[in-house]
Image (cartoon, rainbow, N blue to C red):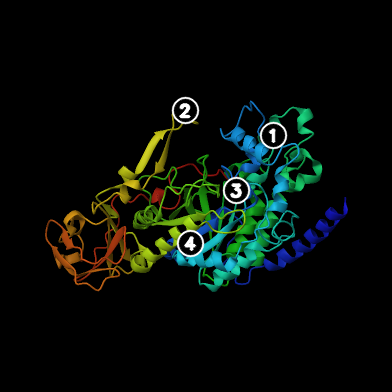
Amino acid sequence: MNAHHRLLFGVTFASFVLLAACLNPLHAAGYEPTWESLKSAPVPEWIMDAKFGIYTHWGVYSVPGFETNVYGKEMYTPKGARKQSGRGMAVRDHHEKTYGSIFEFGYKEFVPMFTAPKFDPAEWAQVMKDGGVRFAGICLVHHDGFCLWDSAFTRWDSMDMGPKRDIYGELAKEIRKRGMHLLATFHHARTYGHHTAYADQFPDDQKARLDVFDPQYDDLYRNPKTVSKEKFGTEWQNKISEVICKYHPDAIWFDGLANQLANGTIDEGKLLKCIADYYNTGTPHVDHPIIMNKLPSGRTWNFPMGFGLRCYENGRDMEADVRGDWLIDRAIGYPWTWVKNKPYKQDASYHIVSLCDLVSRGGILLLSLTPKGDGSIPAEEVRIMREIGAWLKVCGEGIYATRPWKTPAEGIGVEQLRRVAPDTKRKGQAKASWKFEKLEASRGEAVRFTRAKDYSRLYAFVIGVPDGGTVTIKTLRRGNVEKNGKGIRSVSMLGSDATIDWKQTAEGLTITFPKTLPCKVAYGFKIKVNGKLDDSPREQFDDGIKRQGTWPVYRSSR
């Protein structure tokens, strides 16, 4: 045991004591470390009211800024590799042309280059706030295993190396200052074997020359042949508990865990204890924290049915008639990390119409920024966030703290947004994705509805300006909006003082747009009725997909 490992062992032992004290429930909610008990935890109102969140994909992989956020795996692709993503040789070729041979310049060499001189936590938090988000954070650790907080459980963190700063701690303070809830996302369950996934195909004599197989860097590269599942899983668990203890995030999101739980890399019992402690202790900032339950690309939910807030990456494999409480996450511009000459094919309008659609069906949108390697946020992303925020300043009343109405949409429906295609990786199966470009192209044909939680108001978002400036919304015909057939009492446009010309008949509600419009892309109308808004439930409500969706779940032994 060298000096570093002796020091780390001492710090780790002390940290165990600290974590035990920190995670001792202060106001026990009574959750037991079992899935049955934890499934009784509610999806709290605050997250359902928030509607819009932000995080970041940023780390050591942002330094090369090429092609992908899994650069550290792809760069170690041998020629003629049997299994690779298709971009492996492109990444390796770029690496060797730019930095030199992978046998001389390994991924760890980027760590001293990751100094982030332009990282300004106040600026980051303000960009987030200006975007109108209600909860915010960062990816604290990606698949490469480098941690963006001051950790006692690894030397490969932003306090000990690279920036020499507690990135998450500094940003968390600025996020809290601006009244946003704090999010933490963890992607390091996939660190185990990440860097050696393709490198393992090198001949033995070449492996001996690669740093990913050098025992002195086992604590970064986590080679399954030299690091046990138990050791990796314990460190993974300790890092989660440490962040909960030090920073008290209100929400936690995990990248794919299903495989790691199923094969024993992550200990289910320890994870259950951690979640129970987190839920029992809570945070000083919300009445109840929440853990998101992702559907990974393998199409098996991270956690058992009924636990947490389900999450579909970019809407992938989301049911056409999704119900209950759910969230989609996606990058503000692809790929998931900053790359040189990055295209931004999805502008602010795309995210705005997405938000209208998702919220109308009960969903939440979580975007990821992709800062540059130097710590600055690209100007395009700053602009996009400001434009989304400007729209929300006008129309946020119909987005925040609303709930789905009995009818979520009219015009361009979900069947026109959801694309189903053969799955090239799974014969005989199909894969679904969601594309919102058709909503962007709407000229008043698409309408999305939300309502106030107490049914006192209905909101109708008309996407695009209709030809002639007049739209008839058939869903809002007399007798279908209000109970007792007393009709609509008033119609106003969010953000506008203009008197709206409207008429409700048995065919629908006809609205004439004012000459001066308060925003772009989508226009919100607030509708009040005589008597009470129709509070009928959505048709054909299937409680079987209310909490979890129709895909398989992680098969727990508990």
- The mark that comes first in sequence, 1 or 2, is 1
Residue count near mark 4 (Cα–Cα under 10 Å), binned few <14, some 14–19, many ≥20: some
The residue wearing badge 3 is: 558
Q: Which mark is residue 199?
A: 1
**Cα distance, mark 1 to mark 3?**
36 Å
Between circles 3 and 4, the one closer to the viewer is: 4
**Cα distance, mark 3 to mark 4?**
20 Å
**Cα distance, mark 4 to mark 1?**
44 Å
Q: Which mark is residue 42?
A: 4
**Residue 489 x, y percent position in the rendering:** 18, 71
Of residues 480 and 556, the one drawn nearer to the viewer in this rendering: 480
Q: How many marks?
A: 4
Kindly state the secondary structure of the residue where label 1 is placed. helix
Between circles 4 and 1, the one closer to the viewer is: 1
Residue 461 appears in the figure: yes
- Relative side of 382 to 243, left or right: left
The disc labelled 2 sits on which kind of residue? Lys
